[in-house]
Image (cartoon, helix red, strand yellow):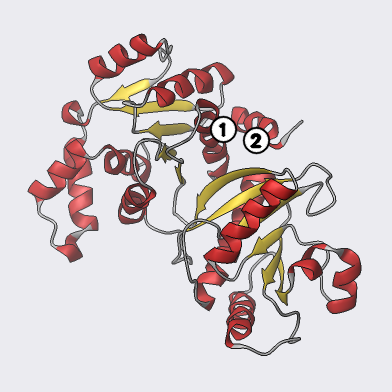
Amino acid sequence: MGLIESIKEKAKLKLRTIVLPEPEDERVLKAVQQVLEEKTAKVVLVGNVETIKADAAKCGANIGGATIVDPKNFDNIDKYIDELVELRKSKNLSREEATLIMTTEPRFFGCMMVRLGDADGLVAGSNSPTADVLKAAIQVIKTAPGINTVSSTFIMETADGKFGDNGLILFADCAVIPEPNAEQLADIACATAATAASVVGLEPRVAMLSFSTKGSAAHPLVDKVQYACDILTDRNVNFSFDGELQADAAIVESIGVKKAPNSKVAGKANILVFPDLQSGNIGYKLVQRFAGAEAHGPIVQGLNQPVNDLSRGCSVEDIANLVAITATQIK
């Protein structure tokens, strides 16, 4: 069984409610049909009921099992508006402004559904920029306790099974933070460990990557990674980590033993935390192309409740898969 198939089987065990706030995209409507047929989640669509039903009929999507919520005809809209005013009071958001946002910005409305317990997670981005999705998520759902950083991870599924856990290895951050500082690197490590455990069922072994292993080079960039490891030690995290490690020392056992002989992670890491976005983004794409690996993601992490961002070039299958992944992120 492949990774996505196993994630879908896990999602079926406890059906979660996932909001899809972009039903104007026919790919979303077709993905809803797939999700409902596969029984991986309950689905809420945000928008005008008649318009959504007409669009579904036009593209041949059966969305009969989905719930449609129209913010402009929603019984609890005042509760949502009041909550947004409270959340944004430091920015002096007026009730009129909050009303406009809640009734015209479906991503904000969907995130408020998640925040107030009317849904468990949200998937968006097929029809909007990443910045719009993350803005709604950060302002409404906020970051998880003890985490101040929203980041992302890719689950890399390699064919030969040589590295990570039977070929599964997580790369972070590959999509959100261009130049993370030490505190942010520590947050990325914690969030990715949580993703590995909840979505994939792995016991996290985190390698904090650098061009140096255990002081083999001296440079401020190395210092940053070392400081991130100190922060993780101070936090007394409940997962194994080590750093700074070069990539080969992190994943090749014979090299790990030689370069970091007393490490619990070197040579057998299943999570690679890259020192910046350039290296992470380049790294996952090289592995994807050179090794023929499947790159599942980006999975957004670090939020109090799960929100995931789609590529605007996504397929129907991509949307359905990300709904299942989002469902398994929920604690």
Task: Say which quarter of the image contains residue 105.
Answer: top left
**Circle 1 or circle 2, nearest the eye:** 1
Image location of residue 217, percent across then percent down: 71, 87
Question: What residue type is disc 1 on?
Answer: Asn
Compared to residue 300, the image places residue 117 above or below, namely above
Question: What residue type is disc 2 on?
Answer: Ile
Which residue is drawn at the image coordinates 34% and 26% (left, top)?
23
Identity of the residue furthest to the front in this view: 290
Q: Which residue is mark 2?
A: 7
* Residue 15 shows in the view: yes
Which residue is drawn at the image coordinates 37% and 40% (left, top)?
117
Disc sitting over residue 50 in the figure: none
Compared to residue 151, the image places residue 106 above or below, namely above
Disc sitting over residue 321 in the figure: 1
Sequence-wise, the earlier of marks 1 and 2 is 2
Identity of the residue furthest to the bottom in this view: 218
Compared to residue 258, the image places residue 145 above or below, namely above
SS for dot 1: helix
Q: Do the CB atoms of the residues marked 1 and 2 lie less than 8 Å apart?
A: yes
Q: Residues within 10 Å of mark 1 (few under 14, many from 20)?
A: many
